[in-house]
Amino acid sequence: MKIYVPRDAAARALGADAVAKALAAEAGRRGMDVEIIRNGSRGMVWLEPLVEIDRDGVRHAFGPMTPADVPGLFDGDGDKALGPTEDLDWMRRQTRLTFARCGVIDPLSLSDYEAHGGLTGLRRALGMGAEAIVEEVTASGLRGRGGAGFPTGIKWNTVRQADADQKYIVCNADEGDSGTFADRMIMEGDPFSLIEGMVIAGLGVGATQGYVYLRSEYPDAIDVMERAVDIARNNNVLGDVLHSGHHFDMEIRVGAGAYVCGEETSLLNSLEGKRGVVRAKPPLPALEGFLGKPTVVNNVISLATVPVIFERGAQHYADFGLGRSRGTVTLQIAGNVARGGLFETAFGVSLGEVVNDIAGGTLSGRPVKAVQVGGPLGAYLPVSKFDTPLGYEELDAQGGLIGHAGLVVFDDTADMRGLARFAMEFCAVESCGKCTPCRIGAVRGVETIDRIGQGDASAIPLLEDLCETMKDGSLCALGGFTPFPVMSALTHFPDEFAAAKEAAE
Amino acid sequence: MQPPQSTQNALAETDILAETDQIVSRHMTREGPLLPILHDMQDSFGHIPAAAIPRIADHLNLTRAEVHGVISFYHDFRDQPAGRHSLKICRSEACQAVGGAALSDHAKRRLGIDWHQTTEDGGITLEPIYCLGLCACGPAVLVDGDVVARVDADRLDTLIEGLSE
Ligand SMILES: Cc1cc2nc3c(=O)[nH]c(=O)nc-3n(C[C@H](O)[C@H](O)[C@H](O)COP(=O)(O)O)c2cc1C
Ligand code: FES
């Protein structure tokens, strides 16, 4: 009998290891022959640890499991039984392209990976030639999932056409945004998809070396990725790629706890062993990136989506989506929600449908007050904006960004002025220090919000001015976008900035 | 007779330098070896000993100031040893949405220390961390490198008690 217990960090943080141990012990006691597979997460975090049992090829879900629930699971009378996993509403409503295998396969089994469509895209790419590979990515409409939404095919083409003795593929796995965990989940649950995506990128642009810059806050992902790279190398996915004569190899590099190192030029400095300060652009990393060589810097999800584009064809991918946001968005639903987790769907679903319907509202049962979309640099949107469709241009029109597609839900107890202050404080803590609007502006921002808190209403226009200065004068989006959460809190919840005044009087 | 203090330090320093040489040699062939070196140094010593900085600088053809500048830039690297155990609490927004700030306050009160400080007995160092990717099951903490989710004050007390045993 096959039993699946996720090794995903969220599942482990909720007790999956103890459940796996209890399952093995109980099976031993009953003299049953079971194989426990540590898979990735299916993304239903509120049901983790979610255990699955394979019965005649159908996977049945149980969760959230505790060691005490284990005997019931074997007796078949467990009250944690949820029915076949694929029949769960959360699963049925998704379009899983990037995450098709995550939670399904054994993350470190290359044969499992291949049996579920893995390496099909790479084999196709090997027969295509560099220019056609890049054209396929362009045709898919894939845009960067790290935040900026830059068309991936255009970036690759710049690197492809650059003339250099060495080029690099750098995967941005710094995933520092609060409310996001898609990169972590795919690295822990389907690491070969990222590796395959990077190999295809290498073939497309003529790069032979890749790096994954992986944040140190993700020890589980580091472990899985390192093992997956070894397995890929031993099986000629890396090295002499599938014995084609094309060469590509890669290495995992661990970050050191600096949020700004998610910014691509800061990341490249860090990878070179320097302080993670932001570089002025131009030159673009595509032309002068790692060690001054042409470099593709792409987010984990951007790269991990490449294999399915080559497996099913660019058109299949591009057929999903809304406007200029093609394909699927890997939503991460977080914060105060009844049902949080990873939900992959075509772009265009409305914010309200996700929060109220898919996520089931708040965990506390209280009314939703605001949703921060797109990480710590994203806007706080009130319930009145719930009809906003999730897409790059659509969020932009609301003074926000979709970013890495994290949604953080807050109930009516949220302190919006406190959250605005936190945005400034975070920017001050994490600023690389290179430009004044960000380094000094953020410190002034905290002080100014404190003045507002003490009842000084004249500080409100100062805060607005400061935000304008930071927006216009910062070198990167850390200082440049911190005004989004601050100004959106001020604009949509003005009472919380004025109420402070009354309280002080 | 006790050896004089300076000899003790000198001995410790030769050990540090020998280990440093080994660590550096493991990474020298990499492109951009400094961060991997510093991570290994920190794993070995719990911090980056000052004595090692000139040695690393020599090997990599950098100035001491450059190496020092890199160490001071990153939150992960310490120039002083930490407590025997590490407790990191997520301060970011998704955890705040489910009581993260109150949890941090509780930890500080209970341990009698602020962020970046170590309890008097050298037992626990408390640090903020900005997101562990456990944002759908916050508040999240990292205890000696192990992730724990949905932590409330009681749960945290139990975790802290587990560390003082
Ligand atoms: C402060 C800051 C932090 C960022 N953090 C990340 C990150 O953690 N992961 C990421 O992929 N992109 C991050 N970005 C965006 C990157 O600079 C870059 O746009 C991205 O890696 C490009 O990959 P993509 O085109 O596939 O999105 C960040 C940007 C800024 C300004
Ligand atoms: S915000 Fe706390 S784990 Fe992400």
Image: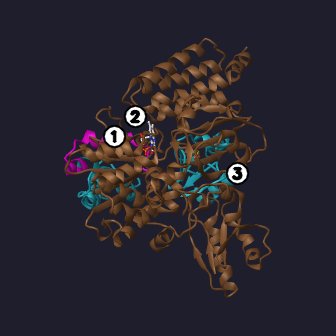
Chain colours: A brown, B cyan
User: Which residue lies under the disc numbered 1?
Assistant: A275
Q: Estimate the spatial distance between the alpha carbons at disc 3 and disc 1, rounded to whole Å.
A: 39 Å
Are the residues flagged by discs 3 and 1 from a single subunit? yes
Report if residue A483 is visible in the image: yes
Q: Are marks 1 and 2 in contact (CB under 8 Å)?
A: yes
| SS of the residue under disc 2 | loop
Residue type pointed to by label 1: Arg
Q: Is residue A105 depicted above or below A471 in this figure? A: below
Residue type pointed to by label 3: Arg
The quarter of the image that holds ligand 1 is: top left
**What residue span does the magenta drawing correspond to?**
B55-82
Q: Quadrant of residue B148?
A: bottom right
Disc nearer the start of the sequence (2/3): 3
| SS of the residue under disc 1 | loop
User: Which residue lies under the disc numbered 3?
Assistant: A339
Quadrant for the N terminus of chain A in the image: bottom right
Q: Nearer the viewer, residue A211 or B107?
A: A211
- Residue B39, position as x, y percentages in the image: 37, 54
Query: Chain under label 1?
Result: A
Query: Chain under label 2?
Result: A
Residue type pointed to by label 2: Cys
User: Which residue lies under the disc numbered 2?
Assistant: A432
Q: Is residue A412 shown left or right of residue A197?
A: right
